[in-house]
Amino acid sequence: MALPRETQPGLAPVVLTMRRRTLADKEALLGRLMLAPALLYVIALVGVPFGLAVLLSFSSATSGSLDFSWVGLRNYATIIVDPQFQHALWNTLRFAIISQFLVIVLALTAAQVLDAAFAGKRVVRFLLLMPWAAPVALAAIGWTWIFDSTFSVINWTLRYFHLTKTWYYWFGDPTLAMVAIIIVHVWRMFPFATVITLAGMTSIPHEISEAAVVDGASFSRRFFQINLPLLTPIITVAVLFGVVFTSTDLGVVYLLTRGGPYNSTHVLASLAFQRGILGANLGQGAAVALFLLPVLVVVAILMLRTARRAEVGA
Amino acid sequence: MTARRAVRILKRIALYLAALAFTVFAVFPFYWMFLTTFKQNKDLYVGGTDLSHIPWIFNLRPTLEHVNLLFQQTLYLTWVRNTVLIGAAVVVITIVLAVPAGYSLARLSGRWGERLGIGIFLTYLVPPTLLFIPFSRVIAVFGLQNSVWALILVYPTFTVPFCTWLMMGFFRSIPRDIEEQAMIDGYSRLAVIRKVVLPLAVSGILTAVIFAFTQVMQDFVYALTFISSLDKMTVSLGVPVALVRGDVFYWGSLMAACLFTSIPIAVVYNLFIDRFIAGLTAGALKG
């Protein structure tokens, strides 16, 4: 791209000395002025609500009234011994870990495939990305229909190929419901992890793998001893984002099972919604949601470390 | 030689099979949406236990019945309009806040610019799940319950941090020399930004616009928490929550709405995905 306007060579130095220095030249001040709106917005609408979430969790606030009375740790004491909460906490961890493990396996394989040259690669890449690009609520309702109790096309296909004789009520059985939720998370997140991994692969210099080929390293050796270690930082980033997106997700669980059957598939997010919004107990809802915080803090720290290590390594 | 050739051909086949398997897994829900959208009810509601009726194809002639129902007898178009209006407002707010901030962090904030940039980016990790409960209180205090303004106020919380980060990276990639040259030629810093930097940053700004808009489409939590009237809903809330009459699911129209909304968004998002990924992985890929 060219400069929009030709500069005037001869006149310039004169203009520079003659023009008074204005606000437009005070760089530090200008920098602050340009940053301030965004910073204030983030402080007012992320920082303050976050602080409010902490405050609410120590209060008996309800959505009906605006009164706000301090109850100390009572909300936490109540939920910690609540089996439903314990189950939701465990589910949150379980869903995130299992789905992210599957996502990494799939993404590494898919990235290998997409790294090779073949006809129709662009089309395949586009189609692979659809689950990630589509609005999550709409994708989730699509899956609800796929897992329908009467018309499930998955059941039909399994029976047609004689893989099973039983009829699966996906949302009627706690285990199946969890499997369904994990399938949807994996389906949605693996494209994202694939593109990230692929970006990491293209950043590995081709000479390295060529040299390994010349030295006679086998495919598995090249993959596990050269590519995988080099890809670790980028895969870490993919996993960290994946953990954040799956552990904080409300849409998939809410639309697939609403936490059912028998409250067996609640995660922290859906339980917080049920207690805080539907049940109007804001204090308890906030306390439930805040149990996500340790996960997020760990993720943030690991993310910063990965970034720093990559910089140091450069 | 022939053995080696056979191996190569086998590898090729394996590659195509793997590509096919991944594609099928990724796309079949959308294919299922497509079939459901255009199937006649008699073809659609057969029941999965009837093995003689293959659900994966059109057994009867396709129909526009469900599509007509969606456009004529539901609020789908209202939801689309709401989403577009909210999206446009959020995009404007995001750009107005994030573009100057990104430039400031890239060029004018010196050493602490980098740290502050990372700090702002980290707020992108604070999820709606943590904020929807305090927001429900804030929104009530402002009297914005059940108003699209609540969403317009809140959505920039996830678009501004990421777009600021995106723009910061983008402005950094513009060679400093161009700006310095223009300043030697007598432009003030502000004039440089207006006349030199912004024209060069058009594609970066466009990326931020697309990102902000697609993120608005993704939200479900905030819309679910704040909006209760059918006619104020966004697509992502209205379709899964309100496109049901009593207990009856109109799956044909429901899937039509999912399909018609998802496909354009997916196409647009795909065009920019590499830039988003570059933004997300900026730290880890520097090496």
Image: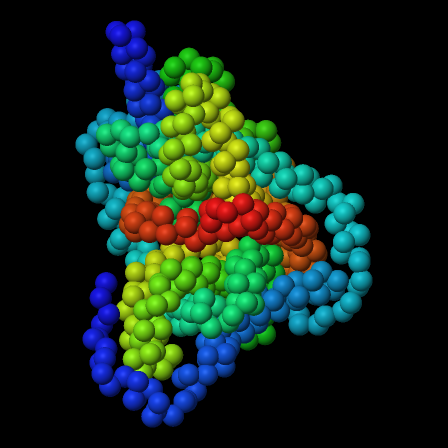
Residue drawn 30% across the image and 60% down it: B203
- For this view, does B243 lie left or right of residue A226? left
**Quick one: A271 or B248, which is closer to the camera?**
A271
Q: Where A313 sits versus B139, above or below?
A: above
Residue drawn 39% across the image and 15% down it: A161
Residue drawn 78% across the image and 45% down it: A81
- For this view, does B145 lie left or right of residue A90? left
Residue drawn 51% across the image and 55% down it: B221
State the image coordinates of residue A95 (x, y, percent, origin top left): 58, 37
Figure quadrant of the N terminus of chain A: bottom left
**Quick one: A287 or B111, which is closer to the camera?**
B111
State the image coordinates of residue B215 (x, y, percent, origin top left): 42, 56
- For this view, does B176 lie left or right of residue A287? left
**Quick one: B232 or B103, which is closer to the camera?**
B103
Looking at the rendered structure, the number of numbered marks drawn on it comes to 0
**Quick one: A52 or A217, which is closer to the camera?**
A217
State the image coordinates of residue A178 (x, y, percent, origin top left): 56, 33
Quadrant hosting residue A208: top left
State the image coordinates of residue B256 (x, y, percent, origin top left): 30, 44
Residue A171 seen:
no
